[in-house]
Image (cartoon, grey):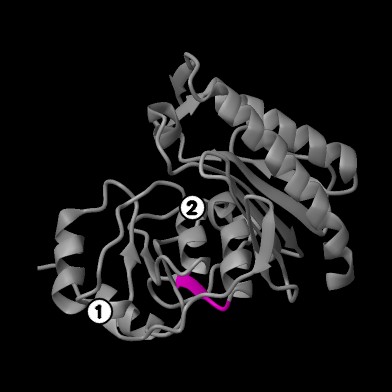
Amino acid sequence: MTDDLPGFLPVARDLALQAGARLNELLHTELVQTRKKDRSLVTNADHDANEILRSGLRRAFPEHAVISEETGPEGPESEYVWLIDPLDGTRAFARGESGFSVMLGLLKNERPVLGVVYDPLEGHLYEAYREGGCFHTFQGARRRVRVSDRSEWRDMPLITSTGFPEQLKSRLQDRMPTPHVKPVNSVGVKVGYMVRGLADIYVNHHPVHYWDTCGPLVILQEAGGRMTLWDGLPLAYRLSAGLRHPGPTLATNGCRHDDILRVLAIPTS
């Protein structure tokens, strides 16, 4: 029930801020960099931020489960499951560039109900819980935010990750003459752009994990936006089916979502 969520949010917010502060401390130090089995980059900063989040959640909510990108599942079987990505955008962090964030999401009975994203380098904090609205805090000022209502292609900025395929980019440019925002890493940072009105479309070109979308999904939906798979199906979080979505995702301000899905469905020649 939503009555639990207002009490959960301050804990998640404080932990995100603590983890982000630790990332900023390590940003200009010599990092210990290794590769995971999937060849993705991981650093000592990922591990330090992860320890702040997972240990903090376990202390605050011993009856909840926690699933982290870095350490996997722990805790009891519970209707509440926290999904955490302590450093989304590790490559940007390792380069000392904008495009990384701390992300926490909460599932209740496998449904996303709460999200916190903190961009420690730029200082933007985004938070939301189901039916509670979306809030953005910057330089001490906290305000409720909503996505834009822009619906003309020429007025709808599009953002992608770095490394976005050129062939797909050309297809989108041909069929959707939108302005393009400079690509950045981190799902959370890009969704932050959307709820602040800096972008209206975010096309992701590869499948991502549940911890990449859970928090940002709640934030975007509470700001009035929409996120689905490329086939239009809603994002599901069936923990027994694994922890990765079956396909890439599309996030928008909702105005031309179905039109963009049709463009994405056109086979690449």
Dominant secondary structure (helix, strand or loop) of the stretch shown in magenta: strand
Query: Does the image show residue 1?
Result: no
Residue positioned 46% across, 34% down in the render:
90
Please, what secondary structure does the residue beneath circle 2 have?
Answer: helix
Q: Which residues are magenta?
A: 224-228
Question: The residue under label 1 is which amino acid type?
Answer: Arg
Amino acid type of the residue that numbered disc 2 sits on in the rendered structure: Val
Mark 1 and mark 2: Cα distance apart in space: 23 Å
Q: Nearer the viewer, residue 222 or 196?
A: 196
Q: Nearer the viewer, residue 4 or 40?
A: 4
Residue at 31% x, 60% y: name it. 181
In x, y percent, where is residue 245?
Answer: 49, 58
Pick the quarter of the image with the C terminus: bottom left
Question: Which residue corresponds to mark 2?
Answer: 189
Viewer-nearest residue: 2 or 93:
93
Q: Residue 59 is drawn in which quadrant?
A: top right
Residue 86 shown left or right of residue 186 in the figure: right
- Residue 261 seen in this snapshot: yes
Q: Is residue 236 above or below residue 106?
A: below
Instruction: Please report the residue visible at 54 percent of the width from the left and 43 percent of the height from the top.
Output: 101
Q: Is residue 241 above or below residue 152?
A: above
Q: Is residue 239 above or below residue 163?
A: below
Q: Nearer the viewer, residue 96 or 140?
A: 140
Q: Which mark is residue 154?
A: 1
Q: Quadrant of the N terminus?
A: bottom right
Q: Residue 31, position in %: x, y?
A: 48, 17
